[in-house]
Amino acid sequence: MNIIQIIPGSGGSFYCGNCLRDSKYVDALRKQGHQVVKIPMYLPLFSDEHDIGEIPIFYGAIAMYLKQVYPVFRKMPVWFEKLLNSKPMMKMAASMAGSTRAKGLEDMTISMLLGEHGQQKEELDKMVDWIVEHCKPDIIHISNALLLGLARRLKEKTGVPVLCSLQDEDVWVDAMQPKFQQKIWNLMHDRAEDVDALVAVSNYFANEIKKRMNLKSEKIHTFYLGVDTEDYKYIPVQEKPRNVGYISRMCHKDGFDIVVDAFIDLKKNTGFEDVKLIATGGLTGDDKTFLKEQKQKIKNNNLEDSFEIIEEFEGDARHNFFKKVSMVSVPVRIGEAFGMYLLESMASGIPVVQPALGAFPEIVEKSGGGVTYSPNTPKKLSETGLICFPIPKNLKN
């Protein structure tokens, strides 16, 4: 089959689970003999994406934002828009504060869901025309429900089925101003009629999105995410350093401060002198002050020699991270629809310790690859981590 996968990029400045999910999905389809074309939107994909060099980034984030907020830019010269949409400019934008922040983008989100009736209708036609000219798809897969405004025009012009994945749309919408939230959910409900199926990544999120979008059960199908275990080197935890790992964007929302505080508490116990906290996953401009505060806490507790940040988090760097840790925790404050880092950790032989929020209990129970805890506090995470660590070799006897 010829498959189109439409993916909103993160710019590669932080570990994006949804982007990684889409990349793994594409790899799996290609291994089965399908032809898959990735169409990036807004920002570039991960920096290790080498197979989309000739494919333009549609709905370039910089130009689209300027057009939405400042009407004068809707008549910008073509050369200027091309400059704004160039990949160097996009990568620079991705590292800046607010580049992936939902709050303040309410009008744009609504406009995107309006599709052919929104402010971005010309960009929609540009994308669809490019697909019709350069691809002959048998099916089109949209990465998330916030892009449902694309579906009607895609089906009209290509005449093929359109599917849409569901993952963490609630996190984006809930961060917006309350007066806009229900309007956005209502638009997503209406636009869901334009796709042939909606695919949730967990039963938890299927039920959550069913309520939020007011959908019938038969419209939603659950398919768990997966990774190819051959892409990861399984090393038993007994053969690894006894280190705590954190792999996600280093921000308040993803609970990086919770894992830092839990680590500080853990280090107060006898027998954990050798344990380090190793973190990776990147950050945006919004997170720099927050990260500085966490580093200061580490310094105040004289644990600088027991703390390491791995700046790179893609490709070999991510696998090297997994070799260095024997437990992973990403104590996000809001329950996620899945969490790709769970599967990546498990495939690398690492148990996960997650708050009992969102889909985490479901995924941990299905896989047997870790434990959950409640409430999501540093103290409880520290206590749970104590029982999960492998026993030091010098204490086994």
Image (spheres, helix red, strand yellow):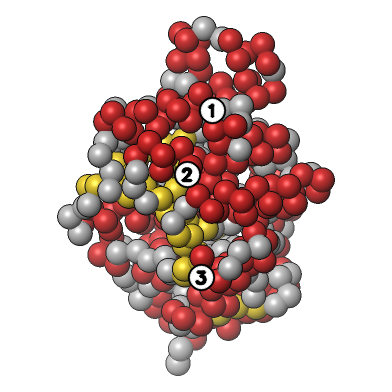
Marks 3 and 2 sit apart, C-alpha to C-alpha, by: 19 Å
Rendered residue at 62%/13% (across/down): 73
Marks 3 and 1 sit apart, C-alpha to C-alpha, by: 31 Å
Question: Which of marks 1 and 2 precedes in the sequence?
Answer: 1
Q: Please name whichever residue, 248 or 389, is drawn nearer the observer in this view of the structure.
A: 248
Q: Is residue 99 above or below residue 375?
A: above
Considering the numbered disc 1 on the image, is that residue within a helix, a strand or a loop? Answer: helix
Q: Is residue 80 left or right of residue 138?
A: right
Examine the rendering and report whether any part of residue 329 can be seen.
no
As shown in the figure, which amino acid type bears the numbered disc 1? Lys
Q: Please name whichever residue, 223 or 132, is drawn nearer the observer in this view of the structure.
A: 132
**Would you name the residue on which mark 1 appears?**
121
**Would you name the residue on which mark 2 appears?**
151
Rendered residue at 58%/10% (across/down): 75
| Spot occupied by residue 64 in the image (x, y as percentages of width and height) | 57, 25
Rendered residue at 44%/20% (across/down): 86
| Spot occupied by residue 158 in the image (x, y as percentages of width and height) | 34, 39
As shown in the figure, which amino acid type bears the numbered disc 2? Ala
Q: How crowded is mark 1: few (under 14 residues within 10 Å), some or many (20 or more)?
A: some
Q: Is residue 120 above or below residue 177?
A: above
Q: Residue furthest bottom?
A: 397
Q: In this view, does 57 lie above or below 366?
A: above
- Residue 50, image quadrant: top left
| Spot occupied by residue 267 in the image (x, y as percentages of width and height) | 64, 69
Cβ–Cβ under 8 Å for marks 2 and 1:
no
Q: Is residue 2 left or right of residue 168?
A: left
Rendered residue at 45%/92% (across/down): 397
**Would you name the residue on which mark 3 appears?**
218
Considering the numbered disc 2 on the image, is that residue within a helix, a strand or a loop? Answer: helix
As shown in the figure, which amino acid type bears the numbered disc 3? Glu
| Spot occupied by residue 208 in the image (x, y as percentages of width and height) | 63, 67
